[in-house]
Image: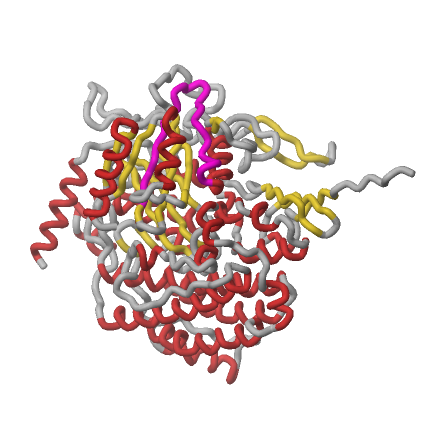
Amino acid sequence: MSVQEIRNYTMNFGPQHPAAHGVLRLVLEMDGETVVRADPHVGLLHRGTEKLAESKPFNQSIGYMDRLDYVSMMCNEHAYVRAIETLLGIQAPERAQYIRTMFDEITRILNHLMWVGSNALDLGAMAVFLYAFREREELMDCYEAVSGARMHATYYRPGGVYRDLPGKMPQYRESPWHKGSDLKRLNSWREGSMLDYLDAFTSDFPTKVDEYEELLTNNRIWKQRTVGIGVVSPELAQQWGMTGAMIRGSGIAWDLRKKQPYAKYADVDFDIPVGVNGDCYDRYLVRVEEMRQSNRIIKQCVAWLRANPGPVMVENFKVAPPKREAMKEDMEALIHHFKLFTEGYGVPAGETYAAVEAPKGEFGCYLVSDGANKPFRVHLRAPGFAHLSSMDALVRGHMLADAVAVIGTYDLVFGEVDR
Amino acid sequence: MSDTQTNSLVERLSARFGDLVKVTVSHGQTTAEVAAASLLSVATALRDEPGFRFTEAVDLCGVDYLGYGQTEWDTTDVTSTGFSRGVEGEAIGRFTWADRPRDVAIPRRFASVVHLLSIELNQRLRVRVFCEDDSLPVVPSLVHTWPGLNWFERESFDLFGIIYDGHPDLRRILTDYGFVGHPFRKDFPLIGNVEVRYDPEQKRVVYEPVSIEPRVLVPRVIRDDADLIQAKAEAADHWREN
C-alpha cells in the first residue's frame, strides 16, 4: 500500500486582499491551516521617492514625504526637515517647534485612529472603524485649516512652518446634508480660532477613546484574536530593528520623544506606555494609551501657543521667503524670493541622520549633501519596512487567520514600506 | 545625545579598534569607517561588548558617490560670453540610458552605510564600508549579526547592485519582477528604460522603450559658502536688534 504524498500548499495572499493593507503580496506556504513559511513581496508601490528627491531642490521634496506614510504625513516631513536643518545649522523659532510638536501628536492620533479602526475591521469588528473615522475627520479639519490640504499638507519647512495657525476655524455652510440643529452642533466648536477648536477637541477626545475601548478592550472575540498572537520578545524586537509600539509592546520603554528629544518634547509632560507580553493585544493597549498621551501633549501645546505669539519661520531669507508685502517695496526681498524659488538654497556638504518618533516607529532621514541645491542622497528609514521583514519569524507556526492579526499589528502602510 | 557622550564614544572606539576604524564626528553624530575585511569582527564587537552594546541596527543603505560635488552651473568664472547657462551637464535627470556617463572611474564609488542604535546606552553610530571594486561592489553581509538588516541589504542590492557576501537570500525587493539594472545608481537615467501599458490588441501588459525626454527644471549648482556666511551674519544682526 502506498503512502499518500502530502505536500505543503502555497498560497497567494494579496496584493488585492482587503486585509493586506494596500499592496502586500504575501506568499504563504501552508500546512493545512498552519503557516510554514511567509514570504512577503513588497515594492508594488515603489515610486523611487529617494531618487526623485535627488533631482529636485530641497524644498520641492517635502510634499513627497507626505506621500510616504500617508496616514502620518507631518511626522515624515518632520524627519526630512530636521535633517536639512541640522546640515544648515538653523533652528526653527520656538513657536514653530511647539506647532510641530502639536501637529506631530495630532498626526499620531490620526494614525492610531486609522490603525485601531482598520485593524478591528480586519479582525471582524465593524463598528470601531466608523467611530474612529468620526474623530479622524475632526483632526483632518485641522490639517486643512492650517495647510489647505486634508492629508498631504507640506506644512513643515526648513526653518519653521509654512504659516501661523489660523485665527478663525472654517465653518460648515448650510446644505441639504447639514442644516438646522445638526449644522449648529457641527459649528459649535468652530466659532473661534483653531486653538479654541483644539481645546474643545482635547476635552472631548478622552471620552471618545473610552468608546473605542468599550468596544474592544474587554471584548471576548477581540481578545481571542489578539491575546498571545504574534508574541515579540524584547530580544527579537531588537534583532529585527523594531521601534515604536512594536518594541514598547514588548516592555522596552524606548521612545525617541523621551530618549533623544527633538522639537519641544523635552518641555511637555507625557508618559510612555509599555506592554508586558509583547503580543498583539498589548500593542493594541499601548497604541490606545498613546492616543490619550498625545491628547495630553496637544493640550499643553495649545496652552503654550495661546500665550506666546511670535514668528513661526526663521528670518533668514536664504532659506525662507520674505513676506509678500516686503517684496512690493524692497528690491532685496524680491531678489531673495526669486533666488529661493528658482534655484533654492545650497546645503553645506556633510551627512546627517535625523530620526523622529513617528506613530509607527522610528522614521529616519539619512541625508548626504555635497553643497548643492539638491540633495546628493536621501535615504528614508521607514519603520514599516523593518517591521514587515520580521514577518516570517513572527508568523511561522501561526494559523492563517493570525497572519492577518500580525499584519494588522505591524501598522503597515505601503507608501513608506515601498517608498 | 550630549557632547560628552559622543566624545567618550569616539574615545572608546579608537581605544578598542585602533586603526581598524576611522572615526569622525560631525553635527554631534559619530561615523566609523571600516574596511570590508574587518567589518564582521568589528560589527560583532559593536553589538556585544560593553561600552558599545549596539543591539539594534536601525538602517542600512547604499550610497553611490559618482558625481559627488559636480555642478552644472559655473558660478565663479565668467567667460567672454558670460556665465554658463546651466542647461547642460551629466547630472541626474539629464541623460538617457544611451548617453549615460560612462568614463567615470572614481575611486571607491559605492559605500554601504549602517546606522546602529544602542537602546541600553542611548547612543547611535554610523558605520560606513566602501566597496573595493567599482565594477563588482562586494561587502560582507551583516545579516548574521543583525537579522533585521536582511531586507535592507536586499534593498541596497536591488537599487545599487552592491553584493552582500554571505546574505542567505539576496533577491531584488523593491523593483518589478524581471527588472534590469540598478535604478539608484547615479548613471541610471531618472526616466528609466522601459514603460508599461496595456495593449488592447494583444490583451496583455506590454513593455516598451521609454518615450519621454529627460528634462531638468532647476540646474544643480554649488555656490561657495558666501551665501550662508552672509545669512548667518544677517541672522546674528537680527538677534542683536531684538
Residue at x 42%, y 48% (from the top left corner):
A65
Residue A131 painted magenta: no
Quarter of the image for residue B180 reads top right
Q: Looking at the picture, tell me which residue is in the foreground, B39 or A264.
A: B39
**In this rendering, position of residue B115 left or right of residue B150:** left
Position of A76 with respect to A394 (left or right) is: left
| Residue A284, x across and y down, in percent | 51, 64
Q: Residue at x 53, y 27 (%)?
A: B193
Identify the residue at the far bottom of this view.
Answer: A181
Q: Is residue B143 magenta?
A: yes
**Which of these two is toward me, A249 or B195?**
A249
Please, is residue B169 above or below residue A365 in the view?
A: above
Q: Nearer the viewer, residue B113 or A130?
A: B113
Residue A315, image x and y in percent?
19, 53
Does residue B190 appear in this view?
A: no
- Which quarter of the rendering shows the C terminus of chain B? bottom left
Write the residue at 55% across / 76% down. Answer: A214
Residue B203 x, y percent position in the rendering: 73, 35
Read off the magenta span: B124-146
